[in-house]
């Protein structure tokens, strides 16, 4: 296990130089430190690097427990990983048409989340994707395929 995010980045600088952020986040997850991915995201953002520019999925734990209030999901993202935004300060999020899957706890325990706009009516949403949220309004163009039973009905726009 790496002692610091800096040590992790120094050890894997070749992946950053090659813009191979998918592999970088896979290694961070393998380290079994649930904060490593979100700390990595913060460090890269401070260096004006947006790893999502080079990825088609938001990796698990991407912004886990980070103090994020606003976030723009790029139009090329197809999947939002497990716990990607869990425990953040998000208030509103728009999920673009390109996203076809939202994994478990992707927005788990986002107590400030008030509204979610899902632009892809065919998006598969795990039933625990919004677990622990204080019942945000979820707006979807049409019926969405739910992977598991959902406890709160969705609003339709």
Image (tube, grey):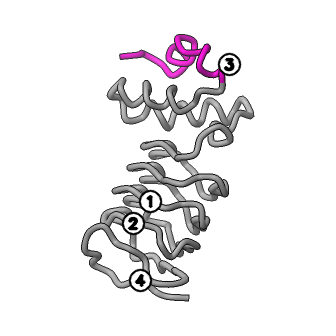
Counting residues from the start of the chain, the first of labels 1 and 3 encountered is: 3
CA gap, disc 4 to disc 3? 43 Å
CA gap, disc 1 to disc 2? 6 Å
Q: Is 8 colored magenta in this rendering?
A: yes
- Asked which quadrant contains residue 143, the reply is bottom left
- Asked which quadrant contains residue 131, the reply is bottom left
Give the residue displayed 43% in from the left and 53% down from the top: 87
Q: Are marks 4 and 3 in contact (CB under 8 Å)?
A: no
CA gap, disc 2 to disc 4? 12 Å
Horizontally, residue 153 falls left or right of residue 66, namely left
Q: Are marks 1 and 4 in contact (CB under 8 Å)?
A: no
Q: Are marks 1 and 2 in contact (CB under 8 Å)?
A: yes
Q: Nearer the viewer, residue 94 or 101?
A: 101
**Element marked by disc 4:** loop
Q: Is residue 151 above or below residue 86?
A: below
Q: Is 4 colored magenta in this rendering?
A: yes
Give the residue displayed 59% in from the left and 61% down from the top: 98
Q: Nearer the viewer, residue 67 or 94?
A: 94
The residues colored magenta run 1-18
Residue receiving disc 4: 154
> In the picture, which quadrant includes the N terminus?
top left
Counting residues from the start of the chain, the first of labels 3 and 2 encountered is: 3
**Numbered badge on residue 101:** 1
CA gap, disc 1 to disc 4? 16 Å
Q: Residue 46: x, y in percent? A: 69, 33
Counting residues from the start of the chain, the first of labels 2 and 4 encountered is: 2
Residue receiving disc 3: 17
**Numbered badge on residue 12:** none
Q: Residue 107: x, y in percent? A: 43, 59
**Element marked by disc 1:** strand
């Amino acid at each position: 296990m790496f002692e610091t995010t800096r040590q992790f980045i120094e050890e894997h600088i070749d992946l950053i130089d090659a813009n191979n952020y998918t592999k970088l986040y896979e290694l961070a997850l393998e380290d079994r430190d649930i904060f490593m991915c979100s700390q990595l995201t913060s460090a890269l953002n401070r260096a004006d690097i947006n790893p999502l520019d080079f990825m088609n999925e938001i990796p698990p734990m991407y912004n886990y427990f980070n103090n994020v209030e606003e976030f723009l999901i790029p139009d090329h993202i197809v999947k939002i990983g497990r716990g990607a935004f869990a425990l953040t300060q998000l208030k509103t999020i728009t999920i673009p048409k390109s996203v076809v899957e939202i994994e478990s706890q992707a927005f788990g325990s986002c107590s400030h989340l008030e509204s979610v706009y899902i632009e892809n009516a065919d998006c598969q949403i795990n039933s625990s994707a919004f677990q622990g949220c204080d019942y945000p309004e979820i707006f979807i163009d049409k019926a969405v395929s739910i992977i598991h039973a959902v406890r709160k009905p969705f609003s339709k726009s």
